[in-house]
Image (cartoon, rainbow, N blue to C red):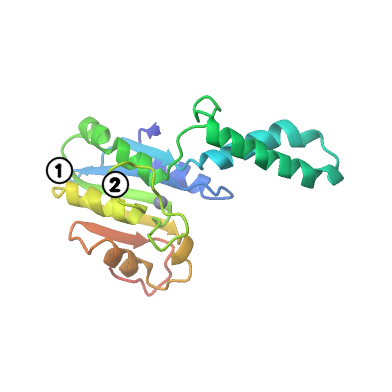
Amino acid sequence: MERYNSIQEGLAELKKRNTGNKKVHALLTFQHKNSKMSRDCFLFESVEDAGAQLIKKYDQLKLSNLQRGDIPAAIAARQVAIDAELSEGDPAELGVVAEGHAEEFLISFFDTAVAMVKDIKFVTIYLTHSPCTVNDRKPSHSLPGWPTSCTAKLSKLAADNPKYHFSIVFMEKFGGLAGNDTPQAHLKQLSGARANLSFIHINASPPYERA
Ligand SMILES: [Zn+2]
């Protein structure tokens, strides 16, 4: 998590990271009951799973000095080593950090942020990509006690906090939503059509979809 002292600054960072970076980022912002925007905002990024993290480590350590012809054998050996480490090792000892989608890290931190910011009425979450859904290949599953997929988790967050209105603003359409012409309505319906939860696609070209 990174904290910024203005929403402009946080948004500029979010947009910067949306270019050439496959990680999903989420910016948590607040508006107070007196309509003033909170200056405090919080940026979160996704963390890939332990296997992918280990593959990167091995590539940096072992594949850098190989001849081209050795690479297939090296990759096979690498996979054996990674599988062995994953089955036996403690992820922390392997230098691997807990995986999760940006939205999951945001949700874990939400109550802390609310306690810091105070007097909240509106919550706006900016995402580089639309939240994953149960129809995606690997929907998020890293937060104990929360449903699978970030769309379902955001729905629960809104249900657990009925005093606030949540707007989920996303730039790119993620995964299964890529070919969907009405992503806002689709996410609204998938999340149970809660009155205090809206989805907004800011790359949508006119005529703007309403959901
Ligand atoms: Zn997700």
In this rendering, does residue 25 appear at all? yes
Mark 1 or mark 2, which is nearer to you?
2
Q: Which mark is residue 34?
A: 1
Residue type highlighted by circle 2: Trp
Q: Position of residue 198 (x, y in %)?
A: 26, 59
**Eyeballing the image, is 11 above or below 155?**
above
Check disc 2 and report its element: helix, strand or loop: loop
Numbered label tally: 2
**Eyeballing the image, is 100 above or below 200?**
above
Q: Which mark is residue 153?
A: none
Between the residue at mark 1 and the residue at mark 2, the CA separation in whole angstroms equals: 32 Å
* Residue closest to the eye, 80 or 116: 80
- Mark 1 / mark 2, whichever is N-terminal: 1
Which residue is at a point 30% across and 55% down the rendered structure image?
A: 152
How crowded pointer 1 is (Cα within 10 Å; few <14, some 14-19, many 20+) is rated as few
Q: Position of residue 158 (x, y in %)?
A: 22, 51
Check disc 1 and report its element: helix, strand or loop: loop
* Residue closest to the eye, 14 or 148: 148
Q: Quadrant of residue 183?
A: bottom left
Please give left or right for residue 20 compared with residue 67 in the image: left
Q: Quadrant of residue 71?
A: top right
Residue at mark 2: 146
Q: Give the quarter of the figure containing the C terminus.
A: bottom left
How crowded pointer 2 is (Cα within 10 Å; few <14, some 14-19, many 20+) is rated as some
Please give left or right for residue 57 compared with residue 188 in the image: right
Q: Give the quarter of the figure containing the N terminus.
A: top left
Q: Is mark 2 within 8 Å of ligand 1?
A: no
Given contact means CB atoms under 8 Å apart, are the residues at marks 1 and 2 in contact? no
Which residue is at a point 48% across and 66% down the rendered structure image?
A: 178
* Residue closest to the eye, 92 or 191: 92
Q: Quadrant of residue 185?
A: bottom left
